[in-house]
Image (spheres, rainbow, N blue to C red):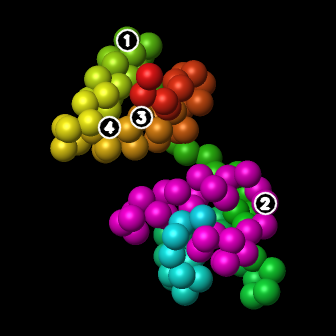
């Protein structure tokens, strides 16, 4: 898994507001605790509200609020339809990317009611 994807996944995991240990995060991401330490340092340097204490764990200090994304219902439907169509083609080189992007859109725009499943 590439670092950018791992950082995104870490943020999604931590959005629930729970304190998580580096070991717990490392298991969830399939990396070492040392990698998690580096990832948390990168996240803090970029301005994400990550707090950590040795022996306790990491937490997002405040809810992560993303800037609003303004899409019309037609644009959102077109995007969802295109991503689902691509994701359903397992031999297509971008099928995996389409599934990942569909998940991200569903996560970032919960008000859209998109089910990130490809069915």
Mark 4 or 1, closer to the camera: 4
Q: Main secondary structure of the magenta part?
A: helix
Image point (76%, 56%), residue name: 17
Image point (19%, 38%), residue name: 92
In the image, residue 19 sits, relative to residue 63, either above or below, namely: below
Image point (52%, 24%), residue name: 114
In the image, residue 13 sits, relative to residue 35, either above or below, namely: above
Q: Secondary structure at mark 4?
A: helix
Kindly identify which numbered label has been placed on residue 74: 1
Q: Kindly indicate whether the residue at mark 1 contacts the one at mark 4 (C-beta within 8 angstroms).
A: no
Kindly identify which numbered label has been placed on residue 98: 4
Residue 75 in percent (x, y) is at: 35, 18
In whole angstroms, how far apart are the C-alphas of marks 4 and 2?
Answer: 29 Å
Q: Secondary structure at mark 2?
A: loop
Kindly identify which numbered label has been placed on residue 18: 2
How many residues crowd mark 4 within 10 Å: few (<14), some (14–19), many (20+)?
Answer: many
In whole angstroms, how far apart are the C-alphas of marks 4 and 3?
Answer: 6 Å
The N terminus: image quadrant: bottom left
Which residue range is magenta in the image? Answer: 1-27
């Amino acid at each position: 898994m590439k670092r950018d994807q791992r950082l995104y996944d870490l943020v999604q995991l931590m959005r629930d507001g729970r304190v998580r240990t580096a070991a717990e995060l490392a298991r969830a991401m399939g990396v070492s605790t040392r990698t998690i330490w580096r990832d948390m340092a990168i996240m803090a340097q970029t301005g994400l509200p990550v707090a950590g204490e040795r022996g306790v764990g990491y937490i997002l200090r405040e809810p992560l609020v993303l800037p609003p994304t303004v899409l019309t219902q037609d644009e959102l439907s077109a995007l969802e339809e295109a991503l689902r169509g691509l994701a359903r083609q397992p031999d297509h080189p971008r099928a995996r990317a389409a599934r990942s992007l569909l998940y991200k859109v569903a996560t970032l725009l919960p008000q859209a009611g998109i089910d990130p499943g490809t069915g």
